[in-house]
Image: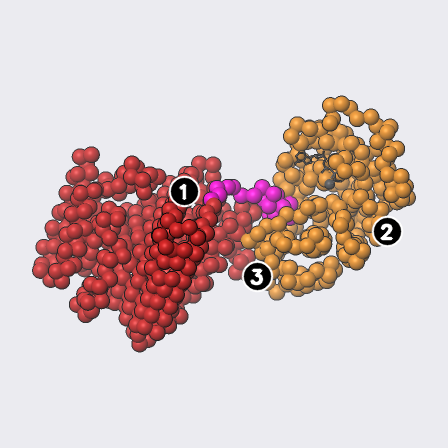
Chain colours: A orange, B red
Amino acid sequence: MSLIEIKNLHVNIEGKQILKGLNLAINPGEVHSIMGPNGSGKSTLAQVIAGNTAFEVTEGDVLLEGESLLGLSADERAVKGVFMAFQYPVEIPGVSNMIFLKAAVNAVRAARGLEELDAMDFLALVKQKITLVEMDEGLLKRSVNEGFSGGEKKRNEVFQLALLEPRFAVLDETDSGLDIDALRIVAAGVNAMRAKDRGFLVITHYQRLLNYIVPDFVHVLVDGRIVESGDKSLALHLEDKGYADWLQTEPQPASAR
Amino acid sequence: MTDVIDIQDTYAESFARLSARRGRSGPAWVQALREAGLEHFRRVGFPTLRDEDWRFTNVKPIAQTPFVLPEPPAGKLGADALQPLLIAGLQPAARLVFVDGCYSTELSDTSALPVGVSVQSVAQALDADPATIQSHMGLAAEAESDPFIALNAAFLEDGAFVRFADNTTLKRPIVLLSVATRRAQAAMTHPRNLIVVGRSCEATVIEHYASAGGEVYLTNAVTELVVGDNSTVHHYVLELESEQAFNLQTLKIRQGRDTTVNSHTALLGGAIVRNNVHPIMDGENGHCLLNGLYVPRGRQHMDSFMFVEHARPHCDSRQFYKGILADRAGAVFSGRIKVHPGAQKTDAKQTNQNLLLSGEATVDTKPQLEIYADDVKCTHGATVGELDEQAMYYLQARGISADAARAMLTYAFAAESLERMNVPAIGELVGRELLSRLPRGRLLAHLLESV
Ligand SMILES: Nc1ncnc2c1ncn2[C@@H]1O[C@H](COP(=O)(O)OP(=O)(O)OP(=O)(O)O)[C@@H](O)[C@H]1O
Ligand SMILES: [Mg+2]
């Protein structure tokens, strides 16, 4: 059975149709990458998988190990093992990163039938995982993402990924705006999390990331549909030629704009 | 209208009974203050919604309740009943306890006070040190300025008298605890506190209002705080009355030059609460912080009425008031700032932020600036909002339930106010109270303790 299966997904936001029949299946252990022009619906897909209720699914389904996610709230999905690294992580003044992480880890553990971690064990876990993303421990004491640099925010996302050990993770442009050192660190963090029973969907604009996180499949998303799938060489082609091929052959219906 | 007149008669009766019981004892000036108070109250009666200062707070439920004055020996409270009312983690330098408005010698403790600080009941002090009391009492809080202050003056009987001699620093706080017990008839108390701080002092005073079984009762307190030059005073009001009670309070502050006053107010209990804070910055280089948090729920109504007077140049004032409203609760914030002629270089700032946890809660917030000097900086801002949806979603996307996420964000909203309180035990107590009111708040309380 696929780890995650997206079937004929149609999604609206504020009455505008963004995803127009998207199909995708990811097996355990696989890393898929999605590339596509700005506004093509990549983040929309990520948000719908994570359970953002601002988006309306009008048709189709999203299944995790054969079970539909659509009736579940974002927290219910998260504790079932769905993780989404935000393209724009949210700043939450007044909520300490440490408290937030502990609440999240314990919520996920509770759902897996594991005991709550005590202060000592939690600290040990944090120290172990934080080295994976070479994140400054000082950031733990600060409010969630507040005043973090762009790179720090992205590392914090991957750090959470490492702490929560999801079944399936979507990374929405986790590489955008990172310098090469930060990119290497973030990619190494993700690679360390690759596992036989875990799947990834990596959304990116840049082929460069895929030198570090080597995908099994690359898909091209244009105007709400996957228009081409291939192996990692497809990303090189895109880097060279852009999306011109598909943008020309896919005339925009007047109603979509 | 007739019922109000009837009620005024019952206040007059209470007054007559009190006078008879008291006999001829007590200085004449105190009796004059009482009579003037009663006279003024008789003339103006309870405020109505037509009074500008009471536009959003209807005191009819207070006016229509026939309160009686508890007579000594009123309200018995055992030491074991006192225990749960003490603030965890706080080691006060002294504690005065008033049970149903009557001073309790047994429950109070002033044995560990250093030289230069005296803490006693007003009744005691009227015997021991009448001159100091006479030279301050009633000067900051004039009966004419508010019907409830007038009523308080009419029933002026007891309260706390705190005095700091010049050059006295005391880091540990002085706690004034007023406890309401369960009584057959709705009781009223009119605590009258006087805090006189000399030159170059540092003092912390906590007024704590709590209930030990009391349900419907009226606390109508007036505190006068006189701050000598070059002194720093931290003043706290921790209002944890029963949710059926009525709490009216006035804090009048007179600040000398080079002074700092930090006033912290946490309103949690009470059916109708009116909290007046009125600093008069009457010396150059005064600093005043008014930090407040009100947390009404159910049908609680809380009215914070600030009046900041800049009477001299080079003073700054900061009002930071936050409200968290649940259910059908109501709140009012009035922030009046008056800059007197000649009070140049005034720097006054006011913010009032409200978080609505329910669509049925209501807030009325209004600034009021009166500026009679030209070289001043006055800013104000008010917000009324709900929890940030983006933040809710982000927390939920990490597995945190909606209730727990709401508790986290609500606590975060209050955190700034709590952190300003430089007596950590109070910030923690208010934080715990806040969390105990939120679904899944206990989970967060547990997390806060364990990290
Ligand atoms: N909250 C929203 N309200 C209205 N329209 C939205 C909202 N979010 C996204 N859209 C619109 O949906 C379309 C798809 O947006 P989406 O963010 O999914 O694109 P994307 O492929 O992730 O683009 P990018 O590469 O710029 O991140 C865009 O036209 C965008 O303007
Ligand atoms: Mg995007």
- Magenta-tinted stretch: B382-400
Task: Please state the chain letter of the residue tagged with numbered disc 3 in the rendered image.
Answer: B
**Figure quadrant, ligand 2:** top right
Q: Are marks 1 and 2 on the same chain?
A: no
Residue B338 image offset from top left, x and y in percent: 36, 50
Q: Which residue is mark 1?
A: B366
Task: Please state the chain letter of the residue tagged with numbered disc 1 in the rendered image.
Answer: B
Is B263 included in the stretch rendered in magenta?
no
Label 2 CB-ligand 1 distance < 8 A = no
Amino acid carrying label 3: it is Val
Identify which residue, A94 or A215, lies in the foreground.
Answer: A94
On the picture, is B341 further left or further right than B424?
left
Which quarter of the rendering shows the C terminus of chain B? bottom right
Distance, label 2 to label 3, CA atoms, is 39 Å
Amino acid carrying label 1: it is Lys
Q: Nearer the viewer, mark 1 or mark 2?
A: 1
Q: Which residue is mark 3?
A: B451
Q: Secondary structure at mark 1?
A: strand
Q: Which residue is mark 2?
A: A211
